[in-house]
Image (cartoon, rainbow, N blue to C red):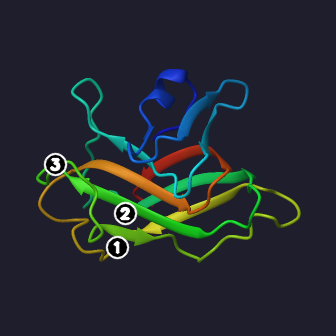
Amino acid sequence: RYDFDTEASADLWNVVPANDNATVTWQSPSETILLTADEADPRLSRKSTPASPVSFDPAVYRYVRCRMKVNDFGADRYDWQGSFYWYRESDAPSFVASRCHRALGGRPDFEQMGNPWHLLTWDMLGVTDWSTESNIAGIRFDLLDKADTVVEIDYIRVEKE
């Protein structure tokens, strides 16, 4: 579980190095993180480190969930991706296209009236390379493919049910 209730929990998350003009910042009052992108395709990632490993059994944890909203769409409309990537402890520590899954339910209506928060769910049952060989050691989210966007993330969780 990543509930972003402390700055230290937010510091574990980074943007992929290719996205130099994107940042992750912790928001103390709301206990959320902001993913701010000046370039297209910001990618939020969490990799294992010796001090703070990512290690969970994919045979046990079937669902990946992210509660998020878009705070700023930039000058143009956003392009939805909704992609979740992972790698295993037995893999080289990199994200590859073969280990990608799309969020259930398709593109959310981020500009709907009412509650701006959306719960994205990736159901990993039967997904190739999810429940085989070894524990998951890194995860990455590609939510939008658009410059000048600000995404606020309330939590990221890997759950059994």
Q: Residue at x 25, y 61 (%)?
A: 59
Residue 76, compared with residue 66, is above or below; it is below
Residue 96, compared with residue 53, is above or below; it is below
Upstream in sequence: badge 1 or badge 3:
3
Upstream in sequence: badge 1 or badge 2:
2
Q: Residue 125: horizontal and vertical position, in percent?
A: 34, 73
For label 3, the residue is 89
Q: Say left or right for 12 vs 92.
A: right
Name the element at disc 2.
Answer: loop
Question: Three-letter amino acid code at disc 2?
Answer: Arg
For label 2, the residue is 62
Q: Quadrant of residue 130?
A: bottom left
Q: Say left or right for 151 vs 92.
A: right
- The CA span between labels 1 and 2 is 6 Å
Question: Three-letter amino acid code at disc 1?
Answer: Leu
Question: Three-letter amino acid code at disc 3?
Answer: Glu
Q: Residue 104: horizontal and vertical position, in percent?
A: 53, 74
Asked if the residues shown at circle 1 and circle 2 are in contact, with their CB atoms under 8 angstroms apart, the answer is yes
For label 1, the residue is 125
- The CA span between labels 2 and 3 is 17 Å
- The CA span between labels 1 and 3 is 19 Å
